[in-house]
Image (spheres, rainbow, N blue to C red):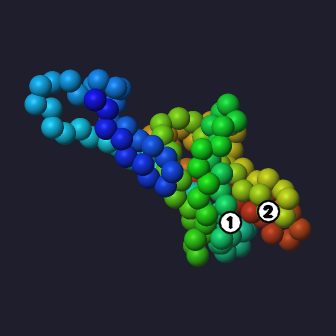
Amino acid sequence: MCHLAKVDGTTFDSGESGSCVIPGCTSASISITDVLVTVTYSDGSPVTNQRVTAITPDGTEVDWPTTDDQGQADAFVNACGYKFFVVLDGVEYDSGDDGSCVVPGCRTASYAETRLTKTERITSR
């Protein structure tokens, strides 16, 4: 039997189906993984109320958290490689190459783009 937990739209499981087959098995562990994505302008001020998209190397979008007052969004994602991006005024800004944030273990990734007088910066850890 496999145990499931759903967090912010992402399903996490305790292992392969049938992984708890020992007679009397009464518990299982589920590991929840997340990436804190921070979106800021070049002056360090946060980009607030902005949707962040987590995308796998094959182009599948898997989570869409929104930045808070500090410009941070918590993306709950399964183990895989991800890129995160935001779209501001029709322009896409991303955190790096496809799959560059490998979960678990991804700590930081950043991308800076100069536009008008500000630089948008996305950091994930």
**Numbered label tally:** 2
Residue 71's mark? none
**Secondary structure state at the residue bearing disc 1:** loop
Looking at the image, tell me whether mark 2 or mark 1 is earlier in sequence order. 1
Q: Secondary structure at mark 2?
A: strand
Residue 1 place in picture, x, y as percent? 28, 29
In depth, the one of 6 and 82 nearer the eye is: 6
Please tell me whether residue 5 is drawn above or below residue 89 in the rendered image.
Answer: above
Q: Is residue 11 visible?
A: yes
Residue at the image point whose x is 67% and y is 61% from the top: 51
> Decide: marks 2, 1 in contact (CB < 8 A)?
yes
Give the residue displayed 79% in from the left and 53% down from the top: 92
- At x 62%, y 54%, the residue is 64
Which is more toward the observer, 69 or 15? 15
- Quadrant of res 15: top left
| Residue at the spot of label 1 | 50
Q: Position of residue 60 (x, y in %)?
A: 66, 37
C-alpha distance separating marks 2 and 1? 8 Å
- Left or right: 103 as drawn, with respect to 87: left
Which residue is the extreme one toward the left?
24
Quarter-of-image position of residue 91: bottom right
Dividing the picture into quarters, in which one does residue 50 lie? bottom right
Residue 35 lies, in percent from the top left, at: 51, 51
Residue wearing tag 2: 88
Please say whether residue 125 is visible from this viewpoint. no
Quick one: 71 or 5, which is closer to the camera?
5
* Rendered view: 115 above or below 15: below
| Amino acid carrying mark 2 in the image | Leu
Image coordinates for residue 74, horizontal then vertical, percent: 52, 58
Position of 23 relative to 119 (above/below): above
Identify which amino acid the numbered label 1 is placed on. Answer: Gln
